């Protein structure tokens, strides 16, 4: 019998003598809770990010009380160990409830403590817990008896708790809306450091007054055993919005493709432009404006302005070394090449192991991708820091259309947690700001190709012609965005390099992002892998 199985001695009904206040000190409870129950529970959670590896066991890394006026909840930092992968930490706040009809789906463990039967549930489901958390941030007593630290910003103006509800979005953490005016995000995957989302939100909004990100209202962190400051929650202003820029872009691109038929456009006669050519609206040919409409280009100019303003704010720090700009150097070059070659190898493995999941165009493209793997590697190695004169700054790091909210004609930028696969240290490395711009350009490419692949039959044109039209549209989107972006960046003296340097960085980062995306798609939605494959081969073939 395996060690794990032999330890499963306690069976339901689970009865413990301890009371709630000292339950976590009871080794019998910990054993049952961690192995018998939590493993099954955690695997079912949307926020659990370890699903592609096999779970070995869970340990309780740390626990702490989240309490007020004698009302006690526990915050658990769980260490999930895998058979083949590196361990991960997760935050789970727990509560004990006795009402049998409450949160039936959310029960973690039925048990009796001190003669009282009830359930352990994720405390976020309990309004009393959410209220307590809100009030603790509102009063933010500087030093709690527990290792929990509550922080409130000067933008926090509410004077009482009124309501709370789940935000109910598809997301990797858990967000709650308070008083219909603010959002708290409880981070689920936890890193032994300040979460970059908190760091960047506080820096951009409180320190630099950047208006196009939700205002920073407060946060909760834990001092762990090693005195590291671990962020577990971030409170921000709720931004009223009409959805995210990804949905916005899909609708816009659909209109543009529908216009092909409506405006009887001959795709072969559409004028094109060089990739990365900077374009003012007056430089966009009338045939393109007539086809795509003026409004999408005006909106892209605003999106570019907000992106540039974010980078100007991020590049304007002279004291806090976490944010001061840096130049390229050999350390960065070595770090970057190692990282990208490692990531590329990982993608190759994942593609080779999952070839059976690809069909049609993706299956054709993947052959070429595998045949040309050495060329792609060479591209990654062609990075020479001595030729780059621009600055490196803290950047968004996972910038795509899904991270932008649409409000009227304007845009709000969010979710600064960084690239999900990177370590916490790597997420804080300074990069050329054009890396974010490359991310958003990849997103334009995604929106155009997703429209062709998902609604292709709706437009009475051959797929070849749709691709041709899509490539033209892509280049004009990029040109208009780039002109606004570069103009604002340069007017604010942020050095992003001379023209050739900018183009080199954009292509380099777009290839990096497309390779990253290939792994993301192979794991999460293989039928979309065709999009990054098109992207990778487009760059390698210098099609653009
Ligand atoms: N401050 C906010 N105001 C309005 N909506 C928000 C706010 N923060 C997040 N959202 C919505 O919640 C979604 C998920 O938020 P995000 O920060 O990306 O969470 P996660 O890191 O868990 O993926 C966003 O795409 C957005 O629609
Ligand atoms: O969940 P996150 O927002 O951290 O990002 C991950 O998921 C994204 C998909 O939701 C993924 O983005 C890719 O698909 C988008 C369309 O769904 C597209 O707009 C992006 O350009 C493309 O990268 C992202 O890569 C991944 O990290």
Image (cartoon, rainbow, N blue to C red):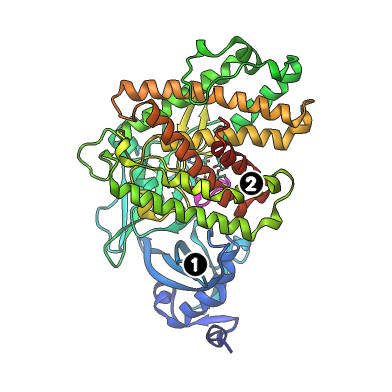
Which of the pair 200/242 is nearer the observer? 200
Q: Which residue is mark 1?
A: 85
At x 59% / y 70%, what residue is drawn? 40
**Looking at the image, is 165 positioned above or below residue 444?**
below
Q: Which residue is mark 2?
A: 368
**Looking at the image, is 507 positioned above or below residue 423?**
above
Q: Quadrant of the N terminus?
A: bottom right
Which of the pair 221/446 is nearer the observer? 446
* Residue 357 position in % (x across, y down): 70, 55
Image depth: mark 2 or mark 1 in front: 2
Whether 171 is among the magenta residues is yes
Name the mark on residue 458: none
Residue range (magenta): 166-175
Structural crowding at the residue carrying mark 1, measured as other residues with C-alpha within 10 Å and reported as few (<14), some (14–19) or many (≥20): few
Between disc 2 and disc 1, whose residue precedes? 1
| Ligand 2 within 8 Å of the CB at mark 2 | no
At x 56% / y 84%, what residue is drawn? 8
- Residue lying farthest to the left in this orientation: 319
Q: Quadrant of the C terminus?
A: top right
Mark 2 and mark 1: span between their CA atoms?
30 Å
* Secondary element type, mark 1: loop
């Amino acid at each position: 019998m395996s060690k794990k199985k032999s330890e499963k001695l306690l069976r339901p009904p689970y009865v413990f003598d301890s009371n709630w206040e000292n339950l976590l000190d009871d080794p019998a409870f910990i054993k049952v809770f961690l192995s018998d129950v939590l493993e099954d529970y955690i695997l079912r959670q949307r926020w659990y990010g370890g699903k592609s590896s096999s779970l070995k066991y869970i340990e309780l890394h740390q626990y702490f009380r989240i309490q007020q006026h004698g009302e006690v909840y526990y915050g658990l930092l769980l260490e999930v160990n895998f058979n083949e992968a590196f361990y991960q930490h997760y935050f789970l706040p727990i509560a004990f409830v006795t009402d049998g009809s409450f949160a039936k789906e959310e029960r973690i463990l039925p048990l009796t403590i001190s003669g009282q039967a009830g359930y352990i549930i994720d405390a976020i489901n309990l309004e009393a817990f959410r209220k307590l958390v809100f009030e603790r941030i509102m009063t933010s007593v500087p030093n709690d008896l527990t290792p929990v630290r509550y922080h409130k910003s000067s933008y926090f103006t509410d004077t009482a708790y009124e309501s709370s509800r789940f935000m109910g979005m598809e997301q990797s953490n858990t967000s709650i809306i308070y008083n219909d005016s603010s959002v708290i995000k409880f981070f689920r995957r936890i890193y032994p450091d300040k979460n970059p989302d908190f760091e960047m939100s506080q820096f951009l909004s409180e320190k630099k007054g950047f208006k196009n990100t939700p205002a920073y209202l407060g946060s909760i962190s834990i001092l762990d055993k090693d005195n590291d400051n671990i962020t577990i929650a971030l409170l921000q202003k709720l931004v009223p919005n009409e959805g995210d820029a990804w949905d916005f872009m899909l609708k816009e691109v659909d209109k543009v493709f529908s216009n092909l038929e409506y405006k009887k456009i001959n795709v072969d006669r559409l004028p094109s432009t060089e990739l990365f050519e900077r374009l003012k609206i007056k430089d966009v040919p009338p045939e393109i404006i007539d086809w795509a409409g003026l409004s999408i280009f005006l909106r892209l100019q605003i999106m570019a302005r907000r992106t540039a303003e974010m980078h100007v704010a991020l590049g304007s720090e002279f004291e806090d070394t976490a944010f001061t700009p840096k130049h390229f150097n050999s350390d960065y070059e070595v770090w970057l090449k190692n990282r990208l070659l490692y990531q590329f190898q990982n993608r190759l493995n994942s593609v080779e192991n999952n070839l059976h999941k690809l069909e049609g165009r993706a299956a054709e493209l993947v052959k070429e991708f595998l045949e040309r793997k050495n060329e792609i590697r060479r591209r990654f190695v062609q990075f020479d820091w001595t030729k780059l004169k621009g600055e490196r700054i803290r950047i968004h790091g996972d910038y795509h259309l899904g991270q932008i909210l649409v409000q009227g004609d304007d845009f709000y930028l969010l979710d600064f947690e960084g690239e999900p696969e990177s370590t916490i240290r790597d997420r804080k490395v300074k990069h050329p700001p054009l890396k974010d711009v490359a991310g958003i350009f990849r997103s334009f490419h995604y929106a155009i190709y997703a429209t062709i692949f998902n609604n292709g039959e709706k437009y009475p044109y051959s797929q070849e012609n749709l691709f041709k039209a899509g490539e033209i549209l892509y280049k004009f989107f990029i040109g208009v965005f780039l002109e606004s972006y570069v103009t604002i960046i340069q007017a604010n003296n942020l050095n992003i390099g001379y023209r050739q340097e900018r183009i080199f960085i954009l292509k380099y980062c777009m290839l990096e992002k497309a390779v990253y995306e290939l792994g993301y798609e192979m794991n999460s939605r293989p039928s979309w892998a065709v999009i990054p494959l098109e992207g990778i081969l487009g760059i390698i073939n210098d099609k653009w």
